[in-house]
Image (tube, rainbow, N blue to C red):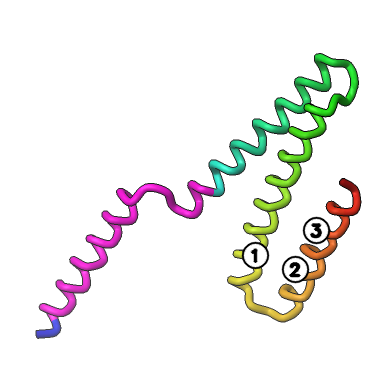
Amino acid sequence: MENNNLNEKKNDNEKRKIRMKTSGFSFSSFISLIAYIGIGCIAIALLFTLIFKNDSTVASAFRTVGEVIAYLISIILAYSWVKNHKQIGWIVCYVIFVVTIVILFILTI
């Protein structure tokens, strides 16, 4: 009877793994896509700055979008690290860092 339960659990785990592989986007692939878009924005901003020899508004817009994406990815990945370590010191520092980034970014726009 126990052997039968183990086989059922094994089959359920295998089915879940297959569904996870074929279900499309995972969290890591979503973050990778956002990172790809972010580096594209930064590259376009640098290209426009080089072409126009000054800081045009279009280059500034692409640079800002790239920076926001970079900040968001950093914040999301840091959250998953803090969540895994679950110590109050890490959580407090994380909150202070994120609030500082958000406030200073908004003030410098």
Q: Which residues are magenta?
A: 3-30
87 or 100: which is nearer to us? 100
Question: Residue 99 sits in which quadrant?
Answer: bottom right
Is residue 27 one of those drawn in magenta?
Answer: yes
1 vs 3, front mark: 3
Q: Is residue 34 left or right of residue 66?
A: left
Q: Amino acid at mark 3?
A: Val
Near mark 3 (Cα within 10 A), the count class, few <14, some 14-19 or many ≥20, is: few
3 vs 2, front mark: 3
Question: Residue 79 sits in which quadrant?
Answer: bottom right
Residue 104 placement (x, y as % from top left): 88, 56
Q: Amino acid at mark 2?
A: Tyr
Residue plotted at (75% across, 68% down)? 94
Task: Compute the Cα span from label 3 to label 2.
Answer: 12 Å
Task: Compute the Cα span from label 2 to label 1.
Answer: 8 Å
- What residue is disc 2 on? 94
Q: Is residue 82 left or right of residue 1?
A: right
Q: Earlier in the sequence, mark 3 or mark 2?
A: 2
Q: Earlier in the sequence, mark 2 or mark 1?
A: 1
Residue plotted at (33% across, 51% down)? 23
Task: Compute the Cα span from label 1 to label 3.
Answer: 15 Å
- Per the rendering, the mark at residue 102 is 3
Q: Is residue 13 left or right of residue 72?
A: left
Residue 82 placement (x, y as % from top left): 65, 69
Q: In the picture shown, does residue 91 fall above or below 106?
A: below
Residue 28 placement (x, y as % from top left): 50, 51
Q: Secondary structure at mark 3?
A: helix
- Per the rendering, the mark at residue 79 is 1
107 or 85: which is nearer to us? 107
Instruction: Tell me if label 2 and label 1 are in contact, CB under 8 Å.
Output: yes
